[in-house]
Image (spheres, rainbow, N blue to C red):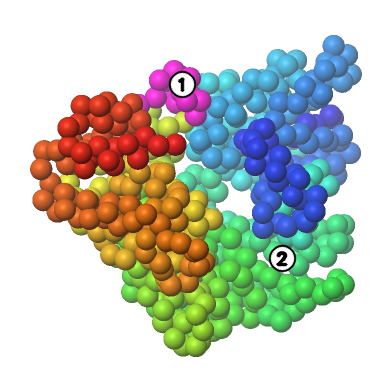
Amino acid sequence: MRVLLVEPDYRRGSQSFKKKIAESEKKRDDETLWYPPLGLMKLSTFHKQRGDEVRFVNGCDNSVISDLFNPSLMWDRVYITTLFTFGWKEVVETIEFYKSAVGGSAHKIFVGGIMASLLPHELYEETGIVPIQGTLDTPKKIRLDGDVNIDHLMPDYSILDNRIYAINDTLYAYTSRGCVNKCAWCGVPKIEGALAPYVDIRASMRAVNETYGEKTKIRLMDNNVLASEHLEQIVDDLLELGFGKGNFSEKNPKRLKVVDFNQGLDSGYINKQTMELISKLHIRPFRVAFDRLSERDQYENAIRLASEYGVKEFSNYMLFNFNDKPIDLYERINVNIDLNKEFCLKSGTNSGAIYSYPMRYAPIKDLEIIKGSKYGYDQDVGKISREYHDESQVLPSDFIDGAVWNKKFLRNIEVIKAATHGTISPTPGLARRAVGRDKLQFIANLYMPEHMLRFRDVYEATAYEGEKKRDELGTGDIEDFYEFIDKNARKPDEKFIEFHKVIANNSTKEIREFEYKCCDEEYKRWLKLYLKK
């Protein structure tokens, strides 16, 4: 058979893609490159073992359908992978584009992956393609004979461009599938199905090393590995593969071999028994989620225990915008700031240990506010809407402690993250500068004009411990804005409530209209900054 593997073009035409290609010519650093499409890589191995011709492309590639007037060059099968639901437009366009590559035979197109598992009915209604749901554990799911578990096969690294994809020094694997938890915000049960507590990766990982050369990092994609009853066996497998603490590669120069539990470790399962096991591995970074403030004691105990077992670098995700309030996120970030201070005192250094990553919850779909297709293809914005509107139009009784998420607040969290490369610094002073010294400053940062937030050095007169020394301090506008929010949000009058409504919607048009009719000079001062590019 002639088999075509396709990853939709989510990013290829972007400036970041062109920059990545240029930079990767100099240094191919897997930490900055894209995750590879593992499902397609395993399908490549499967079909090549059958003796089939296989080709991989990214996006709608005219070169693979240009000679279709010759029946012998028609593709027998096209496999299209999917990522998150916000890539709806790209996926639908890709499916429609490749229908001609199979002569219009919809049954020759196979669509799988995350979005296909989460929105199978919607995708069928939009394209006429019946998606493959869950993991590809049998050829029967793609209407072929055999009993091989395709999901357990060695990924075929040869089909990808190593200037783009993070395959230069990294192995990818699942040592377990699924999760015992059923978190309301999580799609894992739909994507991976029932819990599979053990996957033997030794043969496939050895095959990758033998075929493509030794790799010094193994990135494990398990969703809750510590919950597996076979954790001891999983650790033994990793030790057998050479990923024990203190192990180095045989390359020249030698490099330390590292394990990354990429999807995070469940703090509820971090105890002396599990730490005794996984501390045999060199885990970097040590990822632990802190999704709910109610889990504070459990989380703090897990971090301190891991630290006792020698963990030095933590990377911790914090879900927000799901049944919580902004102050809830601030409190969790504050926990990490305090833990970093604690670790600094113990180590006698000024370096922190915990990198905090606020991660916005977004619904899989929000059909009520979508125009265009009844299943969420918005002709105006070209993507599934993923805003969470549950409380965005609610006026809080308290604009500080009781503040609720809205479009502006969500946007400013992303601006804060962008300014700090996606993370809140482990250095306490820099963390305070990013989020604020107290609750009032944190909320004020969420209200703040984006231009001020992006160019803090220009507008901020306060110097924070740990920041790069500035030749001269800023104008002090940020400090004035803190006073403005403090004065008006504590006891809001009708003017501030109107201001809040306009800013919360994060609409330039509404801000411009409000600024035009506003007669208060103090308000007009800030409104002009909201309109500054």
Asked whether 518 or 140 is in front, the reply is 518
Relative vertical location of residue 509 with respect to residue 337 in this rendering, above or below? above
Question: Magenta segment: does it hold 88?
Answer: no
Label 2 CA crowd tier, 10 Å (few <14, some 14–19, many 20+)? many
Which residue does the image show at 75% across and 26% down from the upper left? 61
Q: Mark on residue 380?
A: 1
Report whether 292 appears left or right of 237. Answer: left
Relative vertical location of residue 505 with respect to residue 410 in this rendering, above or below? above
Q: Which residues are magenta?
A: 369-383
Give coordinates of residue 56: x percent, y percent.
78, 36
Give coordinates of residue 111: x percent, y percent.
63, 32
Mark 2, residue position: 217
Which residue does the image show at 74% across and 50% down from the upper left? 23
Q: CA distance from mark 2 to mark 1?
A: 42 Å
Dot 2 falls on a residue whose secondary structure is strand
Name the image quarter holding the N terminus.
Answer: top right
Q: Amino acid at mark 2?
A: Lys
